[in-house]
Image (tube, rainbow, N blue to C red):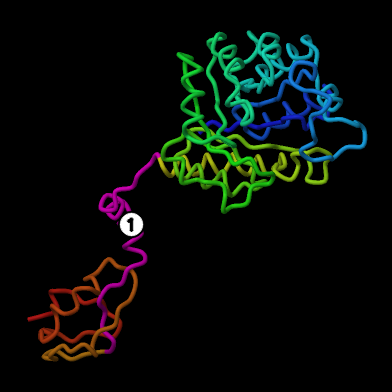
Amino acid sequence: MKIVAEIGNQHNGSIDVAHTYIDAVAKAGADAVKFQCHIAAAESTLSEPWRVKFTRENISRYEYWERMEFTPRQWIELAAHAHMQDLEFIVSPFSIEAVEMLDGLVDRWKVASGEVGNTPLLKAIAKTGKPVVLSSGMSDRVELAQAVSSLGSVPWIHTLQCTSKYPCPPEEIGLNLLNSLHGLSDHSGSIYTGLAAAALGAEMLEVHVCFSKQEFGPDVSSSITIDELRQLVEGVRWIERIITNPVDKDEMAQEMQPMRDLFTKSITFAEQLKAGTILEERHFAYRKPGTGIPAADYGKYLGRVLAQDVPGRAFLQETMLR
């Protein structure tokens, strides 16, 4: 499963923080890093309302988007840094201008939930010929199908289950939809959701990340920390090994024979017995190791007659019997 670390706007407009995130998610084991490309004048208006009024620095949402902007040169540096860390570089563009600026830099586009119905943007993305990740956070199946049609013949489209709630409660995550979609864009703020998606065979997992749950930003409540990302990656890779290595129970039992010899029980005598004793269940005890006659076979020896005296705790052997 491809694990995408979504930085979003958690850099808070600082290019240095953005680069720090690239190093951190790479060290945590993510496969890709994802940013959002905002150009305020191209995507917003002064009347755009706040989803969450989390900052006193900007009076309007428009001003906030301005603060999130990076220059073309800075985007080049971010892409180069990601590739140096062997990370796939993914960006969500929120305008045609953003697509034009980043064409040639990104490895894959991510269409944010609010842009699924933005057909002109989808067509601009399709012209680049790059693979696309499509978020379904606010869309029904008809709108998703229309978006896929608008994207045309791009090399590959991953459609992700997503619920646009921040954070998203477990009851509304919708892992049942993974049987028809390719993966999950997770807003739960927990690693449990991603682990469950991996166990169900999701191809891609996108998770928001932050350095601290006390950090400043609108998506912190729906993010996991870098340390949690490391745990998530380890857990997903463990689950993948489980899923891709089915076990044959009969073959495994044969392989376990040395362990069976150690831990299973053999038939032994509970006490010292004389030759001629007719064996009853009370004469037997069942002890390790399991290298003698198996305890499961005790019934075969009830009523048999001893041909010799036997000491207590001795292992039953066929040669002891008439």
Q: Where residue 319 appears, x then y in whole percent?
A: 12, 74
Residue 314 is situated, as x and y percent measured from the top left of the image, at: 27, 79
x 55%, y 25%: residue: 133
- Secondary element under disc 1, as helix, strand or loop, is helix
**Is residue 318 toward the left or the right of residue 53 in the image?**
left
Q: Nearer the viewer, residue 282 or 71?
A: 71
Query: The residue under label 1 is which amino acid type?
Result: Pro
The image quarter containing residue 295 is bottom left
Give the residue drawn at x 70%, y 14%. Answer: 98
Q: Which residue carries the number 1 mark?
A: 258
Q: Is residue 288 left or right of residue 67?
A: left
Q: Is residue 125 above or below residue 280?
A: above
Foreground residue among 152 and 289: 152
- Please name the residue shown 71% across and 24% down the image: 36
Provide the residue span drawn in magenta.
244-271
Residue 261 in the magenta stretch? The answer is yes
Q: Residues within 10 Å of mark 1 (few under 14, many from 20)?
A: few
Using the image as rendered, state which of residue 147 and residue 91 is in the foreground.
Answer: 147
